[in-house]
Amino acid sequence: MMQRAYTAALRKIEILLCQSAETRYEEFTKTFPGFVQRIPQYMLASFLGFTPEFLSMLRAKIK
């Protein structure tokens, strides 16, 4: 169980460092489409590594 948690943490760090914010948001919405509507914007932004204001800007740009 510890190995899986460690691997997941490393994967998240890799994604945060190597992918753009737009790519992270797009992949998250494709992978977990139901969460985007249910999770508060500030929590989603924090999980993806940016501010709620930037998330609002991304949503407006993508739509």
Image: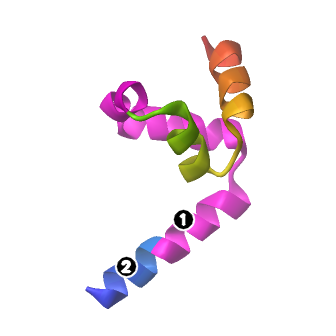
Picture residue at 54% right of the left edge, 51% below the top: 47
For residue 53, side relative to residue 12 (left or right)? right
Task: Work out whether 35 lies above or below 20.
Answer: above
Q: Which residue is the site of mark 2?
A: 5
Pointer 2 local density, CA inside 10 Å: few below 14, some 14–19, many at least 20: few
Mark 1: secondary structure: helix
Q: Going by the image, does 35 lie left or right of 58?
A: left
Picture quarter containing residue 63? top right
Residue 23: give x, y in percent of width and height: 63, 40
Q: Is residue 63 magenta?
A: no
Q: Measuring 40% from the left and 35% from the top, which residue is drawn there? A: 39
Q: Please, what is the three-letter code of the amino acid marked with disc 2?
A: Ala
Give residue 60's position: percent from left, percent from top.
Answer: 67, 14
The spot of residue 49 in percent (x, y) is: 65, 52
Say which of 20 and 53 sits in front.
Answer: 53
Q: Left or right? Give the position of 33 relative to 50.
A: left
The residues tagged by marks 1 and 2 sit, at their Cα atoms, a distance apart of: 11 Å
Between residue 30 and residue 52, name the one nearer to us: 52
Give the structural element (helix, strand or loop) at label 2. helix
Spot occupied by residue 57 in the image (x, y as percentages of width and height): 73, 22
Magenta span includes 28: yes
Pick whichever of labels 1 and 2 is earlier in the sequence: 2
Residue placed most toward the observer, 23 or 48: 48
Q: Which residue is mark 1?
A: 12
What are the residue bounds of the magenta stretch? 9-38
Query: How many marks do you count on the picture?
Result: 2
Q: Amino acid at mark 1?
A: Lys
